[in-house]
Amino acid sequence: MALLPFLFCCKKDKGHSADKAVLTFSNVVILGNSITYAPANPSIGWNGNWGMAASKPELDYVHILESHFKVNNPKVVLSVKNIQPFEVDAAHYDFDAELKSLRDSHPDLVIIRIGENVSADVDLAMFEKRYAALINYFKADNPNVIVLSGGSIWGSVIDNVMAKHPPFILLKSIVNEGANFSTGLFADAGVAAHPTDKGMQNIASLIWDYIKTLK
């Protein structure tokens, strides 16, 4: 899967000032699924190269969070990777093959935002073991890294599993508002199940509000 470093220009955001009460990060890694990053796939009507189905790259939740991180540290490096294979087959996901370069970059914040592609009949004991191993993979030689997880926007059987390994943010509250989803905006039902720009903003806001509580 693609590993994309997000290196944006260091233009000062005139609408915000640095909030010294918020932790400053220099190396942020976001792991997720197609809501986090989806390459273009014209066969399903998706022509973007960012979080499905945001209308522009700057309007997906990753880029919105990046803009917040930039306020306190304009030089922050943010990397994103789609780990959908972990959702669908956690037992056989190869951490070294997929994540070693990210781990070895020694991030100070890792955000794991998954759940939508996990089967309802997944072996929860197995998944929890592998999820804990995923967290420990980043912490093994980088014990001070913060690993923050966010649950499914639809609600998932693994939300409770992830919550056992805090910090954890429950995100399924956005499912209660239809305007958060792209129903009717794309012919493909899978794409249409993804967040709109508003949904992406709400995901980013929930995550950022939690980040502001980290000490």
Image: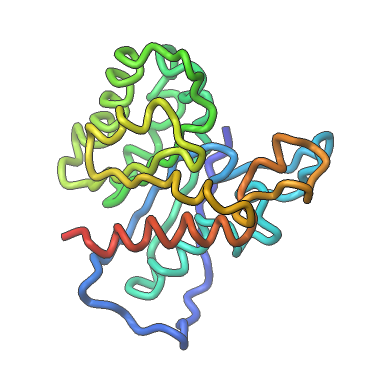
Residue 77 in picture, x, y percent from top left: 41, 58
Q: Quadrant of the C terminus?
A: bottom left
**Residue at 38% in and 43% down:** 150
Please name whichever residue, 79 or 54, is drawn nearer the observer in this view of the structure: 54
Q: Is residue 111 left or right of residue 172?
A: left
**Residue at 40% in and 37% down:** 101
Q: Quadrant of the N terminus?
A: top right
**Residue at 32% in and 73% down:** 72
Residue 124 in picture, x, y percent from top left: 34, 16
- 146 above or below 16? above
Specify the farthest residue to the bottom.
14
Please name whichever residue, 215 or 179, is drawn nearer the observer in this view of the structure: 179
- 78 above or below 142? below
Q: How is the image coloured?
A: rainbow
Q: Is residue 58 left or right of residue 185?
A: left
Picture quarter containing residue 190?
top right
**Residue at 50% in and 51% down:** 174
- 134 above or below 19? above
Residue 128 in picture, x, y percent from top left: 30, 21
Please name whichever residue, 197 or 108, is drawn nearer the observer in this view of the structure: 197
Please name whichever residue, 52 or 38, is drawn nearer the observer in this view of the structure: 52
The total of numbered circles placed on residues is: 0
- 27 above or below 120? below
Residue 10 in picture, x, y percent from top left: 47, 75
